[in-house]
Structures are given as structure tokens and as C-alpha cells.
Amino acid sequence: MAAVQKTSPTQLGVGTFSLTKNAEEYVLQALRSSRLSYGPFSRKFEREFAKRHECGYAVLVNSGTSALSVAIACLKEVGKWKDGDEVLVPSLTFVATSNVVLEHNLVPVFVDCDPKTYNIDPTKIEVKITERTRAIMPVHLFGLVADMDPVLAIAKKHDLRIVEDSCETMGVRYRGRMTGSFGDISCFSTYVAHLIVTGVGGLAVTKDPKYAEILRSLANHGRDSIYTNIDDDKDIDGSQFQEVIRRRFRFVRRGYSFRATEMEAALGVAQLEDLDAILAVRQKNAAMLMELLVPFQEWLQLPSFDPKIQEHAFMMFPIVIRQGAPFTKDELVLFLEKANVETRDMLPLINQPVYASMQIDPAAYPVATWVNTHGFYVGCHQGLSEENLRYMRDVFAEFFASIQ
């Protein structure tokens, strides 16, 4: 195979972050205030994020994984789930989705994915439901909301809870409804290379005030909800003040230290202000990349979705090598990487070494198994220029020329 003739002067990564004037000023405001824990920026980020995603409440935590963890813990507590109860999880997702199920002594039951969208396949769900099934955890992968109508119908039919793992998707709609607005609790991530970037961070959102109260308690060591931050004993007096003082060091459940900082929240506020612009550029870049890669679609399956039904945030640009291709995924990925085009695997899960003891049969999940061995993604974020995308196309062209 021919060597790459040229390389990009800088790596074309799968994610980006740029410091805007507002972001810098907000972080400096937080630092100057000496308020580093939960404060005004955290409250504003939660309030505005919940509003954007058509929910009443958001709880800021230190990662999307932590958001998923408190969501499962909350529903397990309220629903009185028992250890060994089951949660349906896509067979293609980031490992955190199923890890949090195991963390709470529950059993992840895997469901194969759709061959075009890579999200959970609703037609494969009901056969996996047993008397111990308690919830479905649809994951909106790569920026695309899953096909939620049939998932919601199945959940209603079997009285199951919905935990939306929307860590890779925000600010977009499915049939007119916003991602994150479908679940009993929905979870987002603001980790590096995501859509809104705060370094680390995440949010659990809900429409249910009782869930919100429990989520906030769980993220704060299981504290009594009367006091979960240092402002909760301010601007009150009399018997109310006495009650807060009496209960503010009381813990009512086993919780976690999942709190985020004001600096991360300040970045989140600034990034949320720019979310529409971020999404617009990502969608424009993805459209251009699809057009540029059309000459190679004999061997490459490009992103597929119905824009009349789903919006795509394009957190990344997934590519799956078609059956019968005269090259391997490793060959193409290595060629791209040597040309300074960063790639990532498309979230292999069921073949992870950590799950070997579960004795998962790959043949039972043919789509996920194919994607595991033939899928990868590249970046299409707002930090990539038209010149970068054309360079990426040229690298693909050079690869295909080299195998002829």
C-alpha cells in the first residue's frame, strides 16, 4: 500500500475547544468571586440547560457517567428495584452506559442496534423483556436522537422507566421534541470533545421535582435536601433557619461526591450561549463531508437519518466499511492516522475484555459486531475549516487509489 504523500500540519482531531471572550470572562468572574463550589453560574447553567431541553430541572454533576449513575440510583430507590433486576442497554454504546447498571448491582441486558443509525433497534427490544426488566436506556449516539416513539410505546406497555443517555446529543429534536425530554431522567456530558465542553462535567435532567430532589441529594453525599449547598441557610430566619441548621449535616441515603465546580459551570454557560452556532457549523461540515465522500460510498457507509423525523447534532462523523470491501478497517484507519486525521472506534461494547465473564455471544448481536470490527469515526466539529475537510477527502482518495 502506498505511503501518504502529504500530511496536515496539525492533527484534524475528533473534538475541539475554543476560548471565547464570554467564556474567559465568566471563568474569571467565578475566580474573582472566590466562589469555587456550587453558586450562581451552576444555578444558571442548570436552569438554562433544562429550559433548552424542555425539562423543569437539571442537576449539574462532574461527568456524564455520574449523571447516569445518580439517574439509575434514583429510579432504583423510588421504584424499589432489587439487586439483579434488569435494564435494557444498546449493544453499541460507550462502556459507561452499561457500567453504571452493573455499579448498582443491576444486570445490563443488551439489545442490538439499527444498521443505519447505530442507535438501539426498537424491533429487538420486546424479546429481551422479562419479569425482572425495570427500565430501557436508549442512547442517542454520535449526535442522533434514537427512534423514540416505539421505545416509549414499549416502555408504557410494560410499565418500564426510561433513562435517556444523551451524552453525545444535545440541542436537537426528534419529531419536534427535544432530546432529553423523553426520559424519566435524561443524562448529558460536557466532557472534552463533546458538543458543549467544560473539560469534565455532566447534567441529569428531569421533569419530576421529586426525582430532581433525589438526584441532587445523591450527587451531594446523600444529604438531606434541605441543605445541598452553602446558600441554603441564607436569607431565612426563625423556625425555618433553625430547621436548616438542625438538618444540614444529615444524610438520608448513601450518596456520592459528584459535584462540579463554578469554573466548569461558567464555561458551560458560555458554551450554551453558542450552542446554536456550534450545531449549525457541525451540521454544515457534516453535509460537506458527506458530499465529499460520496465517490467512496461503494465501500463506505456514511451517516444516514431522516431529517423530517430527526435532527443530527454530529458530535462526530461515523463511517462503517461495507461488506466485501477489499481492505480492512485497520488499514484505512492507520492510513488516516499517519496523515494526521484522528479516528476513534465506534464505541465497541460487547467485545470489551472487562465483560468477558458475561460470556456474550457476538452472533446474537450481528449489527453491533459488524460495527465493532468495521466502524470508526472522524471529526466534523466547528474547529474544522473547509480546507481541512477537503484535505480529509484527499486522504481518503489517496487511500482508495493505493489499493487499486
Image (cartoon, grey):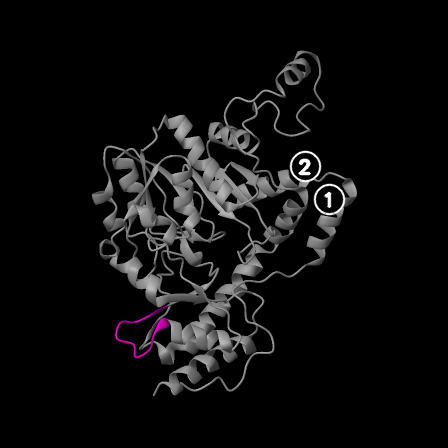
Viewer-side residue, 277 vs 349: 349
Residue 215 rendering spot, x and y as whole percentages: 50, 32
Please name the residue that numbered disc 2 is placed on. 39
**Residue at position x 28%, y 46% from top?**
150
**Residue at position x 76%, y 39% from top?**
34
From where the camera sits, is residue 177 visible? no
Residue range corresponding to the magenta coloring: 320-329
Residue 220 rendering spot, x and y as whole percentages: 57, 31
Characterize the local packing of mark 2: few (<14), some (14-19) or many (20 or more) Cα atoms within 10 angstroms.
Answer: some
Q: Which is the main secondary structure of the residues drawn in magenta?
A: loop
Give, as a three-letter code, the residue at label 1: Ala
Please name the residue that numbered disc 1 is placed on. 30
Of all residues shown, which one is farthest toward the left? Answer: 127
The correct choice, above or below, for 16 with respect to 339 in the image is above
Q: Is residue 327 magenta?
A: yes
Viewer-side residue, 1 vs 346: 1
Image side of residue 348 versus residue 197, left or right: left
